[in-house]
Amino acid sequence: MNVILFGATGMVGQGVLRECLLDPGVKSVLAIGRSTTGQQHEKLRELVHQDFFDFSTIESQLSGFDACFFCLGVSSAGMNEADYTRVTYDLTLAAARTLAKVAPDMTFVYVSGAGTDGTELGRSMWARVKGKTENALLKLPFKAAYMFRPAVIQPLHGIVSKTRLYRAAYVVAAPLMLLMKKVAPKYITTTEQVGRAMLEVARHGAPKRVIENSDIAGLAGTASPA
């Protein structure tokens, strides 16, 4: 399987990249970002691209892939709806529409979030925008598209968030995460499980298109190289 990965330098993307590189069934990974990951691996090729609202100049390099894992995302804190829509909906759809045109046989996997509002009518701004994004992606002519909605994600294997505030929060919350895994496991997942679950749905599909946090561990547990 040949994979395109967006957001490989973020916390979730780092975890997904790790699982792709470890998986013997993944032949190659093309990481597209505004900066490089700093990693070197025989499977990994990196493409630095600055304008994430226009992929026309690199279209020729995006065909021949079996899956796209879209792990880009920003916090809505301090943003108005117009700005958040631009960096969430507009940016994601710019990439997805290009891929649907040049590689319609691929599976597209989008990292959304627990609490996303698929009705687009709720009071939470970020949830409405994420829901709008999910709905638009599900209408594109891909072989298949899956919306991942993780809740609390525990970073493993030395993976850290790029955001200083988030890094500090994860340090403080580490003991709580251990407790949550014991008493409320359906609300917590790990970077490893997210990556393995994405590989599973890219290979074998899933019974539903919206993958909630409680579904991720099950999918990760059934993941097998192919």
Image (cartoon, grey):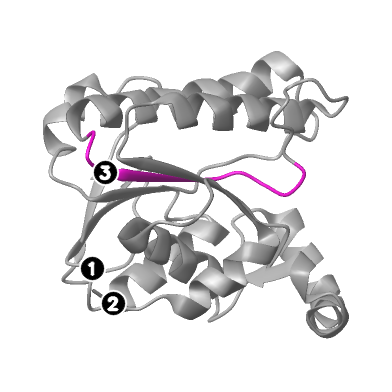
- The answer to whether the residues at label 1 and label 3 have Cβ atoms under 8 Å apart is no
- Mark 1: secondary structure: loop
Q: Which label is found at residue 26?
A: 1
The residue lying at 32 percent from left, 28 percent from top is 141
Q: Which label is found at residue 106?
A: 3
Q: Which residues are magenta?
A: 104-115
Quadrant, the C terminus? bottom left
Q: Residue type at mark 2?
A: Pro
Residue to which mark 2 is pinned: 225
Question: Hey, which quadrant is residue 96 in on the image?
Answer: top left
Q: Is residue 107 left or right of residue 181?
A: left
Which x, y percent locates residue 17? 38, 64
Q: Tell me which label, 2 or 1, sits earlier in the chain.
A: 1
- Mark 3: secondary structure: loop
Q: Is residue 191 left or right of residue 55?
A: right
Q: Mark 1 Cα within 10 Å, few/some/many (few <14, many 20+)? A: some
